[in-house]
Image: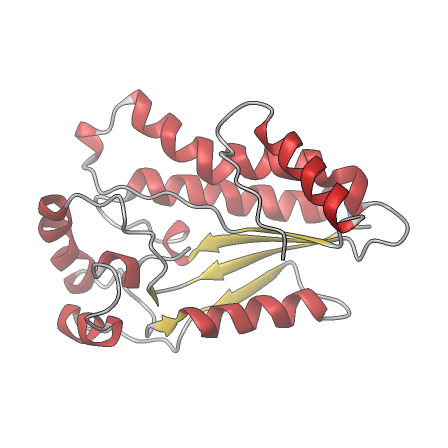
Amino acid sequence: MVPVACDVTVPGASDELVANVTRELGGLDALVYAAGLSRVKALEQTEHADWLELFATNVFGAAAVTRAAFPHLLAERSEGRALYLCSDSAAMPYPGLVAYGSSKAALSAYARGFANEVPRLRATEVIVGPTAGTEVANHFEPAAFEEWAPRWFEGGYVRYAMLQVPDVVTIIMDTLIAPAPPPTVMATGADAHPTMEGARNLAGPDQPELGSAISGG
């Protein structure tokens, strides 16, 4: 493993990241874009800077890293795989998380468009459902979370049973090694209408706040 830090929102950082990684590894077989940022905020309070912040990480960063990785993924000996961790909330945006859901919908369109435009590379969007311990809630304000979370459960926005991180990792790995991965893969639990208390219990006391458990990657 060769860990290399990168802030994908900084111009040029993605190019430097890919250059460093490919120099250390001698090439690039696959790209898995798992970076994600989420904030709980009412639309009437969501400012221009908030939209830019979310899209910079969730969408623009994916495009920048992919552009930098293109020549390496297209190399003759590369496996030519690209996976993008999207979210089930893109199809049914949670109230209070509309900006996040919109950015994930844009990432989904990017991944599917990439698969259509460059069929030589095998691009897949992995739609991640409720998953405990993803740290996606690290930037949630507690007061805003407590205000909006009940609506997510009572309104039926949480539509799948919760998975754990190893469950999602297994799906990602299976997709990476599949001979012909589909353009869309579901990393969700069974169809369900979990309660807030039930989700909190599944997340466990050693994991981040419940928001991490009910919103995708």
In this image, 210 relative to 100: left or right? left
- Locate residue 143, reporting x and y percent: 9, 45
Q: Is residue 172 above or below residue 30?
A: below
| Quadrant, the C terminus | bottom left
Residue 205's quadrant in the figure? bottom left
On the picture, is 111 further left or further right than 40? right
**Quarter of the view holding residue 4:** top right
Measuring from the top left, give residue 59's x and y in whole percent: 50, 37
Rendered residue at 16%/68% (across/down): 196
**Where residue 145 sits in the image (x, y, percent)?**
15, 50
Observer-nearest residue: 26 or 66? 26
In the image, residue 166 lies at what x, y percent? 46, 73
Residue found 24% across the figure and 57% down from its top:
211
Residue drawn at x 18%, y 28% is 45
Q: Give the mark count.
A: 0
Rendering quarter of residue 134: bottom left
Location of the N terminus by quadrant is bottom right
| Residue 32 shown left or right of residue 26 in the figure | left
Of 60 and 88, nearer the camera is 60
Q: Is residue 181 above or below residue 113?
A: below
